[in-house]
């Protein structure tokens, strides 16, 4: 494929850079948590309240008549009223990290833009049409111009599918991804797209040139290899990565291979990254189904880190690691033992809008 790039290019700020606000979707799809949905609104209300104490939250709801019920739950969790704003947008699920807007800055004029990548339910679920429209709806409501990323193959424009949880950037030219998610035939998002194709269009739209391709994600991940379950930038030169110590565990080999890749990885200046090992919680099953429990699905807010915990012996150990690294942020633990039944946690259900 020939790739002709003639228009503006962009750069995506890292999550750990200053944010204007956070987008969150109120839960409504009971099918995502069969048998456990009752617990989910309380968990989401807790997350919203914790973030709202120090920064703004834009909360997406399905129906305006649900607002009073939601407000009651938020009040119970001591949310900051002035920091929560409601928007009515139809959605299929709450996982706005994957379906929502990707905010970037234009290299041409420095203005904030919304990247509206195609979303197809992780090439697994059929109900995704509402979620696919979220970036456009947010663009209209907030008056931030949207850009629809495309690849030009001479014959016609191709609009690639890409989820926010499939990559992580450091805001300084480097990006983390997995081959399992973007290059394998299972749950294939973009048939025919090669590694080189991805690198060309991601360089243009995310402002990255240093690609760190890990191999596989964790067991139980129904996205088939999202990076935000296994490895995350926590500064421009520091990466936290999941490690499994139990050699009998299926994740042991996968995560060890990823760690070896990270140890040899370098930034755009040719310097090695600092790698911080984060132990995995014990293998978790709900109704005999394995779920992707991991501490790496945390969210970095302006003044706090929201860290998923699972009533596991490693919860305290991981909390200490986070406190030691994020010395100027409050580490807030959120029990995600039920939330993870939807195959996502805190990072999956949040999308930051940078302060540009």
Image (cartoon, rainbow, N blue to C red):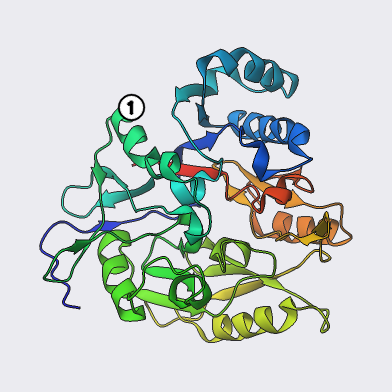
Indicate left or right for 37 with 221 as reference.
Answer: right
Pick whichever, 332 or 294, lies toward us: 294
Whether 124 is drawn above or below 106: the answer is: below
The extreme front residue here reads 126
Image coords of residue 79 (percent x, y): 65, 23
Q: Quadrant of residue 46?
A: top right
Q: Residue at x 84, y 65 (%)?
A: 282
Whether 287 is drawn above or below 139: the answer is: below
Q: Residues within 10 Å of mark 1 (few under 14, many from 20)?
A: few
Pointer 1 residue: 141
Pick whichever, 43 or 51, lies toward us: 43
Image coords of residue 21 (percent x, y): 47, 35
Whether 312 is drawn above or below 334: the answer is: below
Residue 176 appears in the picture as rendered = yes
The quadrant of the rendering that contains the N terminus is bottom left
Image coords of residue 42 (percent x, y): 73, 30
Pick whichever, 26 or 85, lies toward us: 26
Image coords of residue 268 (percent x, y): 37, 76
């Amino acid at each position: 494929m020939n790739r002709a790039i003639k228009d503006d290019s962009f750069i995506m700020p890292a999550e750990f850079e200053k944010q204007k606000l956070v987008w969150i979707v109120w839960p409504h799809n009971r099918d995502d948590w069969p048998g456990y949905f009752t617990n989910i609104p309380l968990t989401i209300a807790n997350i919203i309240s914790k973030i709202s104490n120090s920064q703004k939250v834009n909360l997406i709801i399905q129906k305006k008549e649900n607002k009073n019920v939601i407000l009651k739950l938020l009040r119970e969790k001591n949310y900051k009223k002035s920091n929560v704003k409601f928007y009515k947008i139809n959605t299929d699920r709450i996982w706005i990290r994957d379906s929502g807007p990707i905010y970037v800055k234009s290299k041409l004029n420095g203005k904030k833009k919304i990247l509206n990548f195609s979303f197809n339910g992780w090439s697994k679920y059929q109900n995704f049409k509402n979620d696919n429209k979220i970036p456009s709806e947010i663009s209209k409501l907030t008056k931030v111009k949207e850009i629809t990323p495309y690849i030009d193959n001479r014959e016609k424009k191709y609009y690639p599918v890409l989820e926010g949880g499939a990559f992580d950037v450091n805001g300084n030219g480097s990006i983390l991804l997995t081959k399992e998610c973007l290059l394998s035939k299972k749950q294939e998002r973009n048939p025919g797209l090669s590694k080189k194709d991805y690198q060309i269009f991601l360089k243009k739209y995310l402002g990255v040139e240093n690609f760190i391709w890990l191999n596989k994600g964790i067991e139980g991940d129904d996205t088939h290899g999202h990076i935000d379950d296994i490895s995350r930038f926590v500064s421009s030169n520091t990466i936290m990565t999941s490690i499994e110590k139990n050699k009998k565990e299926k994740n042991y080999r996968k995560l060890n291979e990823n760690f070896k890749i990270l140890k040899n990885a370098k930034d755009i200046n040719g310097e090695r990254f600092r790698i911080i090992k984060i132990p995995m919680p014990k293998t978790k099953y709900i109704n005999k189904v394995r779920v992707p429990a991991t501490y790496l699905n945390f969210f970095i807010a302006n003044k706090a880190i929201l860290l998923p915990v699972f009533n596991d012996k490693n919860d305290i150990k991981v909390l200490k690691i986070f406190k030691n690294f994020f010395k100027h942020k409050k580490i807030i633990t959120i029990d995600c033992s039920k939330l993870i039944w939807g195959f996502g946690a805190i990072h999956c259900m949040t999308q930051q809008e940078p302060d540009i």
